[in-house]
């Protein structure tokens, strides 16, 4: 397992028990995590665990050798913020939940579809979702739109389907990472941080990826 786990981490994958059960179990054993860390350290990275639900390789410093990669990774996450947050808001309303989706939460397509079909405001919200870049599609039927949105969330690593023949999705640890990004950006906004000052952007990215 050492090689595939190391390659997944170095490629920027988020390893959680839902998306990568075997790799997560491997990293949950201290001696295996130590071996991975020994590989990552010379590459200016280290293994991080978030909420006990997620492992990922974080940079230990920002310099000219990795600044471009960090900016690219952060830009990708930021581009997904609005569509994923709006999707979570739609799901909370449709299913009558008080808390936002977290890792290991279950999403049943048919239950979600039934709620959306019976509430015009949710149908409109779903339609607006499919106009956003991440979920953009020309599909107009509610069933097709919802299936498309869930498919894109699976492709981007926020959902996983343990059984590819079933319509049950499980939220992955990447959802928790997104919550962390949102919390950081909210804190930055409340502190009135200027991200455009010299070093500001790198400082923000370093805080999130270290």
Image: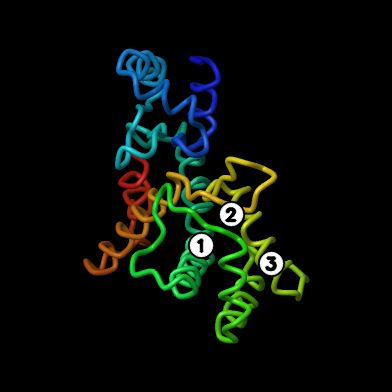
The furthest residue to the left: 191
Q: Give residue 74's position: percent from left, percent from top.
A: 46, 50
Instruction: Assess whether mark 1 and mark 3 are in contact (beta carbons under 8 angstroms).
Output: no
In the picture, measured across the screen, residue 20 lies left or right of residue 123, that is left
- Across and down, in percent, residue 205 comes to 38, 48
How crowded pointer 2 is (Cα within 10 Å; few <14, some 14-19, many 20+) is rated as many
Q: Are marks 1 and 2 in contact (CB under 8 Å)?
A: yes
Q: How many marks?
A: 3
* Local SS, label 1: helix
Crowd tier of the residue under label 1, counting other residues whose Cα lies within 10 Å: few below 14, some 14–19, many 20 or above: some
Measured from the top left, where is residue 96 in percent x and y?
A: 42, 73
Which callout, 3 or 1, points at the residue further toward the start of the chain?
A: 1
Q: Secondary structure at mark 2?
A: helix
Q: CA distance from mark 3 to mark 1?
A: 13 Å
Q: Please name the residue that numbered disc 2 is placed on.
A: 153
Which residue is at 64% across, 55% downward?
152
Please tell me which residue is depicted at 41% across the width and 59% down the height of the picture: 101
Residue linked to disc 1: 84
Of callouts 3 and 2, the N-terminal one: 3
Q: What is the quadrant of residue 39 in the picture?
A: top left
Q: Which residue is mark 3?
A: 136
For image coordinates 48% across by 50% down, the residue present is 171
Give the residue drawn at x 50%, y 22%: 5
């Amino acid at each position: 397992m050492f090689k595939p786990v190391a390659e997944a981490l170095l490629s920027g994958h988020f390893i959680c028990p839902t998306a990568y059960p075997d790799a997560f179990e491997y990293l949950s054993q201290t001696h295996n995590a130590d071996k991975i860390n020994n590989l990552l350290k010379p590459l200016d990275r280290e293994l991080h665990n978030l909420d006990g639900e997620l492992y990922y390789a974080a940079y230990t410093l920002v310099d000219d050798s990795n600044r471009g990669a960090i900016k690219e990774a952060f830009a990708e996450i930021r581009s997904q913020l609005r569509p994923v947050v709006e999707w979570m808001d739609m799901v909370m309303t449709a299913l009558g939940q008080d808390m936002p989706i977290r890792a290991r939460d279950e999403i049943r397509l048919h239950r979600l579809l039934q709620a959306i079909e019976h509430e015009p405001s949710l149908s409109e919200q779903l339609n607006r979702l499919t106009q956003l870049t991440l979920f953009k599609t020309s599909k107009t039927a509610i069933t097709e739109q919802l299936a498309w949105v869930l498919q894109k969330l699976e492709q981007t690593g926020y959902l996983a389907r343990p059984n590819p023949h079933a319509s049950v999705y499980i939220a992955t640890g990447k959802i928790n990472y997104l919550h962390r990004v949102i919390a950081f950006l909210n804190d930055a906004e409340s502190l009135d941080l200027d991200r455009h000052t010299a070093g500001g952007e790198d400082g923000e990215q370093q805080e999130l990826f270290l």
